[in-house]
Amino acid sequence: MEQLPRVVVIGAGFGGLSAARALAGHNIDVTVVDRHNFHTFEPLLYQVATAGLEPADVAYPVRAIFGREPNIGFRCGAVSAVDLDRRQLSMTDGSRLDYDQLVVATGATAAFFGIEGAADFAEPLYTLRDARLLRNELLRILEEADAHPERFADGLCFVVVGGGPTGVEMAGALGELLRVAITRDRLRIDAARTRVVLLDVADRLLTGFSPAASAYALASLRARTVDVRLGVRVDSVTRTSVHLADGTTIEADAVIWAAGITVDGTLAASLPGERGRGGRVPVQADLSLPGHPEVFVIGDAAAAPLGGGKKGTTPQLAQGAIQGGRHAGRQVLRRLRGEPTEPFHYRDKGIMATIGRRAAVAEVPGLPVIRGTLGWLAWLGLHLVYLIGFRNRLVVLVNWSWRYFDWPSGPRMIVSDVEDAADAP
């Protein structure tokens, strides 16, 4: 029996799933590889971290996504190395996986920029595990403050580093979590002495947005009593404090890191060639790796050209990964048919960020800035569209609708992977 062309997609994020979908239904053997057996909807991780959603609400099994696609299989495991000459992947379990065409969609990871103590003491928010650990830590601190108020005589302080969409959304949601914990859960915490501090080195929030959107986000956060400090640089982080370059020290009970991402430390960083900003892998106009037309690099891992005569690279957003994955999948099919590949053209569909309940900004090309409740509803609608799984969409819709009119109890539970010895049977 003739062997079908073997296509491997590394990564089950937005880009990897998009590439696999473009290859579905064709006479080829496709294998999606990921260290987790689920896809994570990363834009909603901050809601998991602040106890607004459960982890299962933002994750969906990869096998279930492609259950009706007989030519697409899944391999749960981590790739340790890529042998470009042999067209072979080495897995961390010692096995190997051969390919004829390869799509690398391994994403990025939190960037700490060499800041002393940041990697050790700050909490990143890039994976589902990060969100679960951060939620446990935040809730643990709140419970300790209630049980031992004498230890928190000066109040609570949570510091968020990074004024991009993740930092803004996290700061707004964290403020709401604190208010609910005090008013609904009746934790003995002094609201007047509880602070959320947002730090950023830039002179405005949401630098990828228009100045009007940045100004709205700043005003909205400050109206929610978030202490926003712009133009400040973090010099070091300890277990209990953040030290700024100007000599200021902020005593902190938790530090959430949302200051940026990097490709360094991921599988894509091992590919040959030069590196772009943040360790991104420069690719050809068709998204292939220079010197290796059988390898495509997409999503956050790639410094992909915008195309269409535009200068610059695609933004590290879900849309960039989705469009890049779809394009890479189509180019794989063209190569297998012996046809020349086509250049990638990024289509800007706009950007969004939410500040809190009934407060968000949305920018769509050709339209004025949408903000406030209308922006918030637009943000909700778009995220429901892209969320995978009917059950997840329904649960999230019900949750958001309930929270719009009221503040339910929510999943404010500390659930550890390893139970205390006292809880063992």
Image: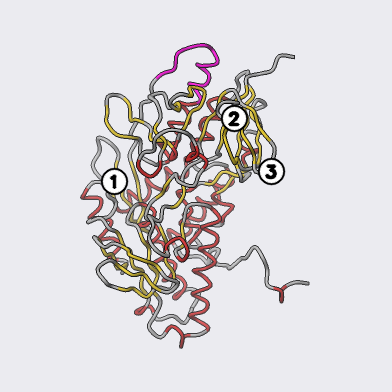
Quadrant of residue 304 within the rendered picture:
top left
Q: Is residue 77 left or right of residue 250?
A: right
**Counting residues from the N terminus, which is met first, the one under dot 2 or under dot 3?**
2
Residue 8: mark: 2
Residue 308: mark: none
Q: Residues within 10 Å of mark 2 (few under 14, many from 20)?
A: many
**Counting residues from the N terminus, which is met first, the one under dot 1 or under dot 3?**
3
Q: Residue 116 versus residue 332: which sits nearer the camera? A: 116
Q: Which residue is mark 1?
A: 208
Q: Secondary structure at mark 1?
A: loop
Residue at screen point 42% across, 62% down = 118
Region in magenta? 329-342
Between the residue at mark 2 and the residue at mark 3, the CA separation in whole angstroms equals 17 Å
Residue 335 within the segment the image draws in magenta: yes
Q: Residue 361 versus residue 306: which sits nearer the camera? A: 306
Q: Position of residue 177 (x, y in %)?
A: 44, 67
Q: Secondary structure at mark 2?
A: strand
In front: label 1 or label 3: 3
Q: Position of residue 357 (x, y in %)?
A: 38, 58
